[in-house]
Image: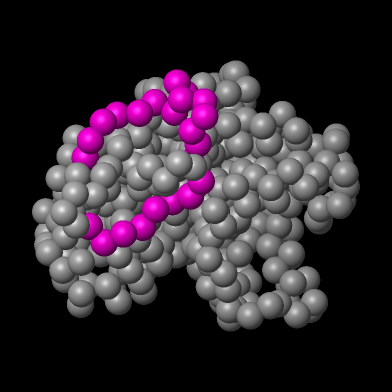
Amino acid sequence: MRLVPIEYLRDGDIIARDIISYDGGVLLRHDTRFKEVFKSRLIERNISEVYINDEISKGIEPTEIIESTVRQRMTNDIKRQFDKLKDKLELDISVVSEITTTLMEQLSRKEMILELDDLKTNDHYTYEHCLAVAILTSLVCDKMNMNIYQKEKIVMGAVIHDIGKIIIPKDILNKPDRLTKEEYEIIKTHTEIGYKMIKDNKELSPITKLAVLCHHEREDGSGYPLGKGEELHIGTKIVAACDLYHALISDRCYRQGLPINEVIAIGQKEAINPSIRKIIENLFAYYPVGCMIQLNDGTIGIVEKNTFSDIKRPVIRVIEKEEGKLIAKSKLNLQDEHQLYIVSRYYERC
C-alpha cells in the first residue's frame, strides 16, 4: 500500500482501503479504479491523501488504530448525543460510557505509533475532533500508567470536551478568515457553556466535568476560562494537551493541517505539562507507513515500518528508477545507517 496525495493520483490507480464518508456511506470502495471525476468529491470531504495498491508498495500494510467502521459508529454516536443535548438538554451517559469503553478496548490491544492520517478529520470537525482527542488521551493515560477507573473518567471528558460548541454560531465556528476579537470571545465561551450543560449530571465524574471546563487552560495560568495553572487536575492537563496537538494537525476551513515537525515546534512553546508533551511527541510518526520519502543522499523509498526506539528513522523500501519506471529494490533500516536521514516526503506520479 502506498499513501498518495489526491493531486498525484492517476486514472486507473487502485484504491487500497474503503473511503468512508461522515454518514457511514462508502465514497469509494477498495479495489475501485480511481477516476479524475472522483477527485472533487474527495476534496469536498477534506480527504487529501488515500492509500493505493501498486507493485512498488506490495506487502506494505499500514495498521488502522481503530477499525474504520467502529470509528464511524462512535463519531455518529457522539454527534447524536451532542444533538440530543442541544435539542432536549439531555445526555445519555450510557452511550457516552459505551463510546469511551469501546475506544479504550480498541486501543488496548498493542503498542501504537500514531500517524497523522489516524487522526485526520473529514466532514464534521467538532465530532471527529472529540473522538481524535479521546484517542490521544487514552494513549497518553496508558503511557502514564493511569489506573483504569481514573483513565475512563478522563477519556470520557475528552469525548465530550467540546460539547459547548453546539451553541456557538456555525458562521463563527466555520469562518474561513481571521476571527475578530469579539468573535474569538464568543468562541471562548464554549468551555463554560459545555460545563453548565453537564455540571448537575450526577452520573458524570467531577474529573470528566473539569475536562470540559478547563481544556483550554495552561500551566502558566494563561488559558481560559479560569486562568488556572499548575494546580489543574492531571486529567485536565492531558485533555488540554491532546486538544492542542490535534487542533494543530487538523485541516480547518481557514488553514491546512500542519506537518508534524511544525506541530512539535509549536507545542514546545505552549505552557503545557512537559511530561505530557514528551509522551505526545513520542507517539507520532514523522513519516507514515506507505508514504514515499527522500534521503539526504538522494535515495527514494517507501516507509515500511516505524519503530518506538527512533520514530524519525523508520525501515524503508528503496525505490529506483529504471527505464522511466519506479522499481522496488532493497530494504534499509535507517537505525543501522547513521549517515543517512530523511529530508522530505517525495512525490511523483508512478
Answer above or below: position of 167 versus 108: below
Q: Does residue 349 appear in this view?
A: yes
> As drawn, is 16 to the left or to the right of 139?
left
Out of 36 and 92, give the one closest to the viewer.
36
Left or right side of 57 for 74 = right
The quarter of the picture where the N terminus appears is: top left
Residue 262 coordinates in the image, percent (x, y): 63, 52
Q: Position of residue 113 (x, y in %)?
A: 46, 32
State which quadrant residue 184 falls in. Answer: bottom right
Q: How is the image coloured?
A: one colour
For the point 86% across and 52% down, which residue is it?
222
Q: Residue at x 57, y 57 (%)?
A: 258
276 vs 41: above or below: above
What residue is at 48 percent from the left and 33 percent from the top?
340
Q: Return the x and y of residue 74 as percentages of the image width and height.
A: 38, 48
Relative placement, left or right, of 64 versus 101 is: left
For the C terminus, the quadrant is bottom left
Residue 13 in percent (x, y) is at 16, 60
Q: Nearer the viewer, residue 61 or 10?
A: 10
Residue 200: in sight, yes or no?
A: no
| Magenta stretch contains residue 272 | no
| Residue 263 higher or lower than 283, as above or below | below
User: Magenta residues, as a range?
Assistant: 328-350
Up-down relation of residue 154 to residue 71 (above or below)? above
Residue 244 or 9: which is nearer the viewer? Answer: 9
For residue 21, which quarter of the picture? bottom left
Q: Is residue 334 magenta?
A: yes
* Count of number-bearing discs: 0
